[in-house]
Image (cartoon, rainbow, N blue to C red):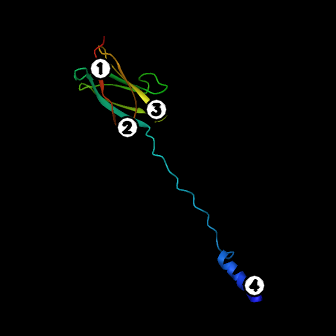
Amino acid sequence: MWRLVVLCATAILVSCGDASSTLTQPSDPPQVTPPPVPSFVTVHGVVTDAVGGLVDDAMIEVAGPVDSWGERGHVASNARGAYTLRFSVSRYPDFEFLFRATRPGYAEQIVRTRVVDGLELNFELSPAQ
């Protein structure tokens, strides 16, 4: 009988481990880090008239959810009608921004769009009525 008790106790110790064995905790799942939100983006494009002519000195302005026109950024198109506008989106990375192109003698054009860095946004201005 004594031998049976010793064998059972040994079996229990072997299957459970002794006091010096350590229990392992399940590891935490890997953390998924979202991609960083750019704090600034650059939007570029060309301003033309209704027949494809280049429009220089057109004012391009951007407005966010609580901004006045041009408060976030503005720039004039060059002699080739081209512009590049760099502005901050850090507070509103997923918002649709408003862009406006104006020039005396032309009707303004307003475009609403989400922005990504490098966005090409062209404007076609019609003669003012």
Q: Earlier in the sequence, mark 2 or mark 4?
A: 4
Q: Give the residue at mark 4.
A: 5
Q: Disc 4 marks which amino acid? A: Val
The x and y percentages for residue 78 are 27, 25
Q: Are marks 2 and 4 in contact (CB under 8 Å)?
A: no
Nearer the observer: mark 2 or 4; the answer is 4
Q: Earlier in the sequence, mark 1 or mark 2?
A: 2
Q: Quadrant of the C terminus?
A: top left
Q: Give the residue at mark 2.
A: 117
Name the residue located 42 percent from the left edge and 22 percent from the top edge: 69
Q: Quadrant of the N terminus?
A: bottom right
Nearer the observer: mark 3 or 4; the answer is 4
Q: Give the residue at mark 1.
A: 125
Q: Distance of mark 1 from mark 2, alpha carbons?
A: 24 Å
Front-most of residues 43 and 111: 111
Nearer the observer: mark 2 or 3; the answer is 3
Q: Give the residue at mark 3.
A: 95
The x and y percentages for residue 73 are 40, 27
The x and y percentages for residue 82 are 27, 28
